[in-house]
Image: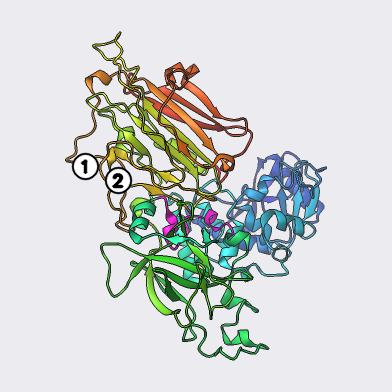
Amino acid sequence: MFDDIEVRLGWGASAEVVRKVPETGLVVFGEVVDVGDKIRQTCILAEEHGYDWVWIDTCYIDKTSSTDLSEAINSMFLWYSYAEICYAYLDDVPSDDELDTETSAFRRARWHTRGRTLQELIAPSLLLFISQDWVVIGDKIGLASLLSNISGIRRKVITRESHFTTVSVAGRMSWASNRQTTRLEDEAYCLMGLFAVHMPTIYGEGRQAFQRLQHQIMQQRLDTTLFAWGRWMSTVMTSIPAEEIYKSFATTKNNHIYLLAKSPHDFEKPFGNMNVYFTLTLTIPLQPYLPGHWKNREPPPNVDPTTGPFGVLEVPRFQLTNYGVECRLPVFESGGITIAVLFSETRDRHIGLLLHPSTAKMQDAARPKYHVGHGFRRANGSLCVRRLVALGADWHAFEFNGERVPAGACRWRDLFIADAPPARERDERLVICYALHCLRPAPPFWVPHWLVGRLAALGLELRRPTIVSHPSAEGEPLLCMLRFQALRGREAVQIVMGTCDQCVLSDEEDEEDDGSEEASGGGEDDADEDRAQDSGADAEEVDGTDTEELETTPEPEPTTDTEQEPEVDLTDDNATVASGATSETEEAPRLGANYTHPVHWARVSVYSKANWNFKTEWTHDCETDHVDAWPGMSCDFGDDERTVRLSFARSPVAPEVTVIAHIDLLGTVEVFPRRGVP
């Protein structure tokens, strides 16, 4: 069953290697090789428990063969479930640890945060936990309640009293929502066994692997909780016009406007951390729908079990097409908003999916196409976008946004929903903007793509940059802002950078003060808004879903002399937001003759839940913010818990003009953990 390599039991510094002969299928012993302490100690432990053979995850795959690698990853869940016993070695937990305490090393063990170990917890019938000094400290049956508290998995699933497939798709996805993987693709591959999915492993495809996993789940399972992720409406709010949705919320990073999730992290439990169930598979749902649900239950006088609450007794259908996901769902309209009933529920409410019409240029009038989510304005004027809505406990009388939905308003409809961003929006390498990524003229600052990717791997994704002013022939300084913001939770790092127009030395005026006024973008409240004003052409961006709570403020009047912001199409294949790149006919911004020796300045603001309301200060202090004045061109910002070190180095291409940025996340708080960083 197991291919090269399996370890034969033995003691000492070496053990015999087992190889499978392809022609005969026989197992023969090979040469003696040195092995590490983990393999040696595992062999000793297994022998003590009466086993002759052991399989170890650190040496079981021939990774030089893509075929063997794919077969092993697809079979791993099955191998764990067939094992007589499994050992989980915790190298960060001592044998004298008090497991049940709130601060125990067992609770904080890395094993609980790894994506691969999820199947190790669920699949085997007997799992022993081994301390760092190779002492058995417990098993998963005896520690089931504690493990349930740590992992969020139901205790009966851990003990195998309930099969894991009885949990909805959204529920199983939520088990992986806080786990990390070294490779992006493993976010999907480590979940294949949980959904009985088999698909080729293609390392290098990135998050497309998770899209393929969801496609396979759609083909094999009728479970609409696959779409029940993201933020939900918890209070009555005012709907904003569709045009404002397209302008404010259509951004490449806002994957919440698509039907399928970007990663398992999107499946953190919504609705106040409540479980989400698929109504049709429940034995006792919130309300009966299928004939089997009415067993031993008498329908109310005004309810006809043969027609259901939506005019005809059907079940939802969905199919992936090149036009989006073709869905058949109960749908109703309220206040200009389209709501689809998902047949998903918590224990006290039904769940609906908010939709808005797509503005894709290529559309079939007979097949209306939608995007997910809708924009709302709170009482304080702030904007937000929501995907899901609680519809109450009675689907014969839904409630939406504080109003009762008229009886008979919800009926079955066929509609198409955009499933995922187009290819150009899935590109992980973000071209920030022309002003910071060009060779001629050389930019004052250079933010490397690898740095953007590294911070994204830590959970901080770059929002659309704000370019208030470009270096110009008249000597106008650069003024820009970059915000790296967590998709989950309230964590953000905001960097304001510029060149000082009071300290610029030209080739002709080395000793003269140019006397120009200090650049100011007019400090403006910038809560949950990315002022995308790159060359006066970027559309304003507001993202209110992917974070814990994004508070926004009413839109301020522009304080810079910019052109009117363009309309933005919210589509799957036509959505565009200006990125600052110049067109073929537009002349690129050029540095003036008196701007060949810019004086760089920068400042960092670190945001968390305690100070979440953003306020961007566009001015700077020449005494503290000039980069050349920092020791080693490096400076720390924040506090002891959250420290951000911003440093610069002279570019070898244009050392007099360009400095290259580098960011280190320091401090005592482990901020933004999502997955391992290569």
Whether residue 22 can be seen here: no
Which of the two labelled residues, at mark 2 and mark 1, occupies the earlier sequence position? 2
The answer to which image quadrant residue 537 occupies is: top left
Which portion, as a residue range, is magenta? 253-269
Q: Which one is in front in this view, the residue at disc 2 or the one at disc 1?
A: 2
Let me know if residue 328 is in the magenta part: no
Three-letter code for the amino acid on which mark 1 is drawn: Ser
Whether residue 596 can be seen here: yes
Describe the colour scheme in one phrase: rainbow
Q: CA distance from mark 2 to mark 1?
A: 10 Å
Q: Which residue ends up furthest to the left in the rendered image? A: 585
Q: At 26% across and 23% down in the image, what residue appears?
A: 475
Three-letter code for the amino acid on which mark 2 is drawn: Ala
The answer to which image quadrant residue 238 occupies is: bottom left
SS at mark 1 in the image: loop
* Structural crowding at the residue carrying mark 2, measured as other residues with C-alpha within 10 Å and reported as few (<14), some (14–19) or many (≥20): many
Residue 563 placement, left or right of 346 = left
